[in-house]
Image: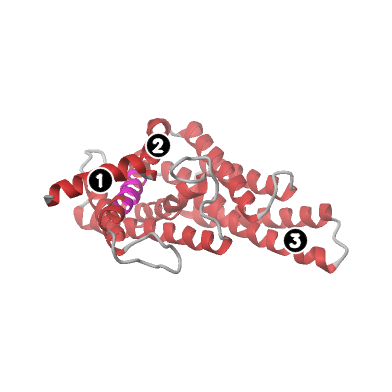
Amino acid sequence: MPVASQIWNRGRRLFVSSPLFLRVVTAAPTVPIVVVAILEGGGLWAAIVALTLVVAMIEFGAAVGISRRDPLLAILAAAAAAIPAVALLSDIPRTWPLTAALLALAAFPIAAGTGLRLGGLIEPTDIRALAPRLAYAVFALIYFAWLGSFLVALRELPQGEEWTLLALFAVMAADTGAFVVGKLGGRRLLVPQLSPNKTVEGALGGFAAGFATVLLINLLPDLNVPLEKMVILAFVLPLMAGIGDLAESTLKRSLNVKDLGGMLPGHGGVPDRLDSLLFGVPTVYFFVLWAVI
């Protein structure tokens, strides 16, 4: 059979009988909504980000054993909703990373105090049972509330709509390129200890797709950053998106779960869809601060 026919048949099987089909079906109605919200900005975008982070926090809580009735989860969800709102209302873009980190960590004493007060801790065994939940709470506050808030903070920068769209589509391109190339031609495992499915070929395909997408979006008339600067972002952004993907793979391996939720068919849960964005969007944010404005 000719090589072209083999590739075509493999690609058709990949799309129809693999998670790629479910990924496309799931993403198709949501991407236009997200794009419109980014273009609109303001409260609409902040509300969508806050809702997304709250759902991600709830799914993460279920994965680590924090039930929906646990007051600790309510505090974490409130922080995930409140910090993006503060990002919208504040006018301190250059100090936002530190501000958001302080807001996220400020929620921890409240969460810890609530857990201690409502948990009725008397026996040492109770303290040992609470400790892992509080450790997960600190992680969730940094991972979701802090990193997630950059989705709003980036939109609030000058030309924020273009930069946010660039981050979104470049990360999507990197994820899709890694998946497709890995399935079609992946042979060498990238980090088998962390993920049994990610391949070197897939990582290179994702990097190439992300790199090209950044440079293509830079051709938009309203953006048009000097090429020598944009090449830096085109190189770093897909790398950070890949690192974000691997970071969540490490988390899932440590928890012995396949996905951190099941709300998005083909993707897993909301945390599984955010993994690359949570590293990619802050990368774009710092690039804009340090190299553009």
Report, in whole angstroms, how far the alpha carbon at label 3 lies from the one at label 2: 37 Å
Question: Which of the pair 202/71 is nearer the observer?
Answer: 202
Q: Is residue 202 placed above or below 57 in the rendered structure?
A: below
Residue 81, quarter of the rendered image:
top right
Question: Which of the pair 142/270 is nearer the observer?
Answer: 270
Prevalent SS, magenta region: helix
Residue 127, quarter of the rendered image:
bottom right
Looking at the rendered structure, the secondary structure element under dot 3 is helix
- Res 224 seen here: no
Of the two numbered discs 3 and 1 in the rendering, the one whose residue sits closer to the viewer: 1
Horizontal and vertical percent for residue 140? 59, 55
Q: Is residue 242 placed above or below 128 in the rendered structure?
A: above
Give the labeled residue for mark 3: 130
Q: Residue at x 63, y 47 (%)?
A: 79
- Give the amino acid at mark 1: Gly
- Res 240 seen here: yes
Horizontal and vertical percent for residue 238? 32, 56
Q: Characterize the local packing of mark 1: few (<14), some (14-19) or many (20 or more) Cα atoms within 10 angstroms.
A: some
Question: Which of the pair 1/223 is nearer the observer?
Answer: 1
Q: Is residue 100 placed above or below 270 in the rendered structure?
A: below
Q: Residue at x 41, y 50 (%)?
A: 281
The numbered mark, 3 or 2, whose residue comes first in the sequence reads: 2
- Tell whether position 225 is magenta: no
The region drawn magenta spans 168-179
Looking at the rendered structure, the secondary structure element under dot 1 is helix
Q: Characterize the local packing of mark 3: few (<14), some (14-19) or many (20 or more) Cα atoms within 10 angstroms.
A: some
Give the labeled residue for mark 2: 27
Give the residue furthest to the front.
1
- Give the amino acid at mark 2: Ala
Give the labeled residue for mark 1: 11
